[in-house]
Amino acid sequence: MTSSTQGTSANDRVAVVTGAGSGIGLSVAQALSEQGHRVALLDRNIDEAQRVAEKLSADGTEAMAYQVDVTDRVGVRAAMDAVRGELGPISIIVTSAGVETFTPVTEISAEEWDHIVAVNLTGTFTSIQAVVPDMIEAGWGRIVTISSSSAQSGAPNMAHYVASKGGVIALTKALSFELAPQGITVNSIPPSIIDTPMARKSEADGDFPGVDVIASMTPVRRAGLPSDVAAACAFLCTDNAGFITGQLIGVNGGWYM
């Protein structure tokens, strides 16, 4: 394993990706590995995360998988400590872990509301809070949150999801002001329709018209791919993006809803 004393050049930093076992998080992990970073893949599904880590390792990246539920504050901090011990101080984090459900506002239970907020908003905050000290010590850091275009436009039967992702945008703005003087940028990507396993599951469950139907409404006439989000994310994690902070980088095919 790489010791925590190894230097962190522009193409050799430690990047943490939550929700890295599938979808957007998987593609982000791949993109960051292609930049030469050591990558820690955090996911509740350790089998998926391990599969991705093994593939990245086979391609020459130093990658490790960790089983983490982002609603577990103690577990998140323990995972970040493990990352430091095995890969080194953390310079980059992308918070991709998230869940969605479709429920009319009159039927959202307290438990369902709390769960969505705990994963999407509180889990984002907890993950970031656990790594910021490393970035402050280094005088350099990159934080990218994955929010949602629905937080900008609204969406039916998703009041809890929209509120949680709106909170992610507000959190991004607040942290960008607080951390900028210390060399840390904080930006958010609010994707529109992205063809992910989660989106396809919602389609199969009949919760929305369908990936291809929604995609036909975008100006580019296609759904986004996880790699589209990953490309924007990877740029935001470079030295070249040092003057970009507190921004929403819409990866949405021109669909501003």
Image (cartoon, rainbow, N blue to C red):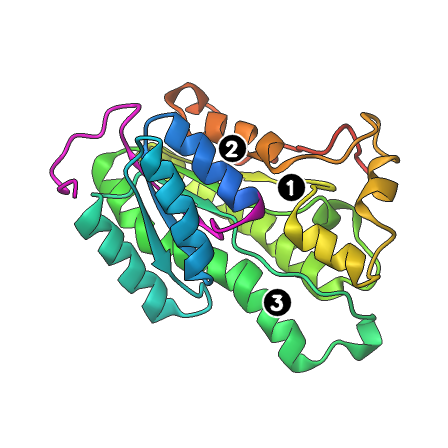
Q: Position of residue 49 (x, y in %)?
A: 42, 53
- Residue 126 higher or lower than 175, as above or below: below
Identified by mark 3, the residue type is Ile
Closest to the observer, 190 or 69: 69
Give me the residue at 63% from left, 54% from top: 165
Quadrant of residue 173 within the rendered picture = top right
Q: Which residue is mark 1?
A: 190
Secondary element at image label 1: loop
- Residue 255 higher or lower than 148, as above or below: above
Q: Which residue is mark 3?
A: 116
Q: Which residue is mark 2?
A: 233
Quadrant in the picture for the C terminus = top right
Identified by mark 1, the residue type is Pro
Give me the residue at 65% from left, 51% from top: 197
Q: Position of residue 198 (x, y in %)?
A: 66, 54
Closest to the observer, 182 or 128: 128
